[in-house]
Image (tube, rainbow, N blue to C red):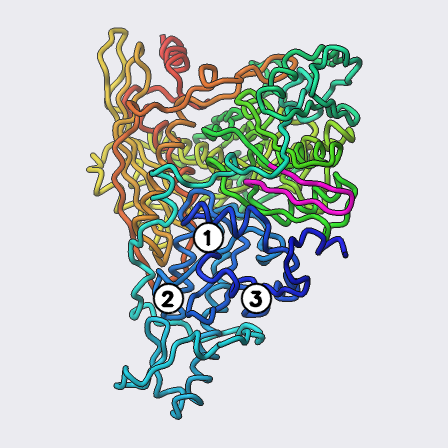
Amino acid sequence: MTPERSWTKGLNPDLSRRTFVQGVGALAVGFALCPAVLRAATIDNDVAGVDKTTLAKGAVDAWLVITANNELVIYSGKVELGTGVATALRQIVAEELAMPFAATRLIQGDTELTPDQGYTAGSATIQQGSDPMRRAAATARRLLIQRAADTLGVTPDRLVTEQGRIHRVGEPTRSVSYGELIGDDQFTQRIDESPAFVDPQDYTLVGQSVPRVDIPPKVFGNFVYMQDVTRPGMWHARVIRPPTVGTTTIAATLESIDEAALPAGVQLVRRGNFLAVVAETEWQAIRAAEALPVTWLTRAGLPRPDALYSSLKASGASEEVVASRGDAQSALSGAPRTFQAEYHWPYQAHDSIGPSCAVADVSERQATVWSGTQGVYPLRSALADLLGMDEGAVHVIYVEASGCYGHNGADDAAADAALISQAVRRPVRVQWSRQDEHGWGPKGPAMVMRLDAALNDDDDIVAWQFANWSPTHTTRPSAAQGAANLLAGNLALGLVPDGPQIGGDRNAPVEYAFDNYRVVTHWLPTATSPLRPSALRTLGAMQNTFANESFIDELAFAAKADPVALRLRYLKDPRAIAVVKAATQRAGWKGRPMPQRYLQIDDKSVAGQGMAFAQYENQYAYVAAVAEVELSVRRGVRVRKVTVAHDCGRIINPDGLRNQIEGNVLQATSRALKEEILFDHTGITSLEWGAYPLLTFAEIPEVEIILIDRPEQPPFGAGEPTSAVVPAAIANAIFDASGMRLRTAPFTRERLSQAFQALG
């Protein structure tokens, strides 16, 4: 039996993917529908031995199959992370094929079944990931119409597709179903490069608020999360890590272990500095990990917390000019008034409510891993390197975990489970603790942003210069980095994570048409980042937009101009202008220079408005937000309301889009007001919720949303753009209310008090 087929369990070794779908029929559902079926169709791994040639991404069959009983099965390399794409993708494909939504199924994130679409990240599932599915569906519709023309004895132009059937124009009773036409055949043709799409004017599903398919089972408690997955004969493991918690370079060596203290029935696994205990029950593993005497030799290497930002600027960095026009430096030198400000953003955690979990079953020749990963194929490559196996022998299956905002601990938990399972030759489940997640999960990077600008005598902005200091925002698993970007690889093999220069420059440029303009990113070597950096929602867009949109407000005040009017003076894109006007008009923008009110020493609250705008990644969704805040020295900042205008082109599911915007507002408000990783010279100290507080239910602001639908435009993602503008809007509202400019996040009561004291 070949390695890539050795996990087939009683199935025909020549089983094709289409045969699998026909065999399970309606049972091949996506993760959102029926938990029992999910276990049978995916978790129990009865899909092995599939024909991998069907995964060629240029073929229609790579993306969809129509079964004999007229069901549409969609294969997606992008996965549902809680953003609603499992519903939206089905809407898009069903629309192009004129299929009822209820007749569609989604299979996602399986290296044996779905195409390789890289990571589900960057708000790219709809704007990029859906395109090949849509083109495959349009191609399939053309092929079905051609076949129906032969069956019904008319030319293709005399046929209509409707509800999964094709009939003659004006003769709905003369029809044939897709299932009858396709029979036992497959769509072996390649996808049309420029297929004929359904006219947006004829949409019946796209643009409609189809209820999200994953919500009912989650609400009623019968959804199967990654944490629920079990395997026959499975044991449980805990990894024992050094005290240098969360550092990029793990400066620790395992010196000694008192194995005599290991309880009966508990097995020890060690490889290099990777140490774990395995037991029949999870509680046994937890107790054994806590009780085992272990000695580490460590070296302190982190900067003092108060020296973090100066240490980032002092790290050896490579300079990249991201954007430039005119001569910003000369314009600054010759201007009558110049301004400079520096903004700071801390390390932040992913703070998913459920800590990461994974299950692995590794034998001598093959491995199967169940994970909440955002990229089954990149994780497969990294695991193959870690385990010393061929990629074809590693099968990774996505199972939705309890929340994900970027590169959290899901991949690392999978690597833990795989390495331990390889050692003990049995299925192993690794459930991270809250301390693991907060301490060892990758962090959204700390950043420094410095801006310089100049005004002439007419209060025009004649120069704008931006510089930031940032490590890469992605050390995700990849074929290029192999085991180095897995925590188990760092410990077992002494590797240091690294990644391409991504994220630090996101939204560093602005959309304002300044004549003299320069944007520079200083890329820090990954190894010099004190804490392990990687992707957190928006990557660097939140940090950079916080700086840019705060600074233009500072210039507005200096120019005695209304902040909205100043922005509109330099915006040329009609879609950008539209969202700024829509948000500020709906929010009742007062139209004034800021600020009008100031904090007093007493406990009286003051209120203010602030706004911010960005086009995400300078090419995708347009978002403007107005924040309304109330604050006092003693009680700190309270965000009362956030008004958002959002243009992401063609809207697929309005209700799902509102879900995403609301979630962005709440999380970004939490990140702006509360969230900051704390550390000392050895590692992270904020290892539980008390030390890393989140926005509470009582603190949630009212959210008002204006959706600008553009059916004629391509759709853009909405999972991240709103987050980018919210912190700047809040900071600007704080200034409006108090006259105090907070340039370091989060805007805690302590920082507000310090700023007040600095004003004297």
- Is residue 349 or residue 489 the one in the foreground? 489
Verify whether residue 199 appears in magenta. Answer: no
Label 3 Cα crowd, 10 Å radius (few <14 / some 14-19 / many 20+): some
Question: Where residue 16 appears, x then y in whole percent?
Answer: 61, 65
**Horizontal arrangement in the rendering, residue 515 relative to residue 683 (left or right):** left
Q: Earlier in the sequence, mark 1 or mark 3?
A: 3
Between 640 and 63, the one nearer to me in the picture: 63
Three-letter code, disc 3: Thr
Q: Which mark is residue 113?
A: none
Report how far apart the C-alphas of labels 2 and 1 lie in the structure: 18 Å
State whether residue 743 appears in this view. Answer: yes
Q: Earlier in the sequence, mark 2 or mark 1?
A: 1
Q: Report which residue position mark 2 lands on.
A: 95
Mark 2 or mark 3: name the one nearer the start of the chain: 3
User: Label 3: which residue?
Assistant: 19
The nearer-to-camera label among 1 and 3 is 3
Find disc 1 in the rendering and name its residue: 30
Residue 186 picture quarter: bottom right
The relative height of residue 457 versus residue 114 in the rendered view (above or below) is above
Mainly helix, strand or loop, the magenta region? strand
Question: What's the amino acid at mark 2?
Answer: Glu
Residue 372 vs residue 393: left or right?
A: left
Q: Quadrant of the N terminus?
A: bottom right
Residue type indicated by callout 1: Gly
**Part of the protein shown in magenta:** 359-372
Question: Is 322 located above or below residue 689 in the figure?
Answer: below
Q: Secondary structure at mark 1?
A: loop
